[in-house]
Image (spheres, rainbow, N blue to C red):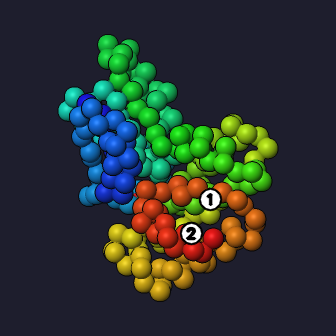
Amino acid sequence: MIGIFDSGYGGLTIFKEIEKLLPEYDYMYLGDSARAPYGGLTKNTVTRFSKEAVDFLFKKGCSLIIFACYSASALALREIQQEYLSTIRKHGNKTRNVLGVIRPVVEYAATRSKKHKIGVVGTQATIASGAFEIELKQRNPKLRIITQACPLLVPFIEEHSHTTPEARAMLKKYLAPLKRSGIDTLVLGCTHYPHMLADFKREM
Ligand code: DGL
């Protein structure tokens, strides 16, 4: 069974795509809606919550867990893979694994940009972590990366008010520096932003 974990319901967009590609597997989805959003929390807190989610999903019988959450992937995944998982494996559970969403997105984005100039938008926590920059530079050191935290977009989307003029005005403000920078590729590094995909496209 594959476990899919997100801070809330946003990761369902990612779950749906995984299920389309791998319909033969069983899935369990865990959204930590009671403690979401994660995007403004510290690394320690996100790591603690993510470890609890990992424990829960392993106990339920998952052998692979996918963090369908950019904030958890950016802040907690490395520690969970390097320290936590290796401890679990030492105790005999060798088949268990945890993967995130940043690397696959980076692999795709790094091959798309002809101008080698990529923009990344995400939560405050994801952008401050520098995770996208590190991964993108590892793929291609020539890339120029322009990042922008968009902390108010998740609350707008959660409240279903992302189609209001206020939400669109906020998006315009966030995207203005990215537009000026001349990027040719923009990574939507947050589970919620696909809900505003048409607005992102129109604005850019
Ligand atoms: N799931 C989070 C992410 O992709 C967005 C919502 C939150 O801040 O918890 O970063």
Up the image or down, 153 lies above or below 102; here it is below
Q: Amino acid at mark 1?
A: Leu
> Residue at coordinates 69% horizontally, 36% vertically from top-left?
138
Question: Number of callouts in the render?
Answer: 2
> Residue at coordinates 76% horizontally, 40% vertically from top-left?
141
**What percent of the width, then of the height, locates residue 62?**
27, 30
Which quadrant holds residue 18?
top left
Q: Which residue is mark 2?
A: 201
Find the distance from the CA under tag 1 to the CA under tag 2.
Answer: 10 Å
Q: Amino acid at mark 2?
A: Lys
Whether ligand 1 has any atom under 8 Å from the Cβ at mark 2 is answered as no
**What percent of the width, then of the height, locates residue 89?**
37, 18
Q: Is residue 62 left or right of residue 68?
A: left
Rendered image: mark on residue 186: 1
**What percent of the width, then of the height, locates residue 182?**
76, 65
Q: Nearer the viewer, residue 46 or 32?
A: 32
Element under disc 2 = helix
> Residue at coordinates 33% horizontally, 49% vertically from top-left?
16
Q: Is residue 126 left or right of residue 117?
A: left
Q: Nearer the viewer, residue 35 or 109?
A: 109
**What percent of the width, then of the height, locates residue 204?**
63, 70
Up the image or down, 198 lies above or below 125; here it is below
Q: Nearer the viewer, mark 1 or mark 2?
A: 2
Q: Can the viewer see residue 171?
A: yes
Is tag 1's residue or tag 2's residue first in the polypeptide sequence?
1
Quadrant of the drawing holding the N terminus: top left
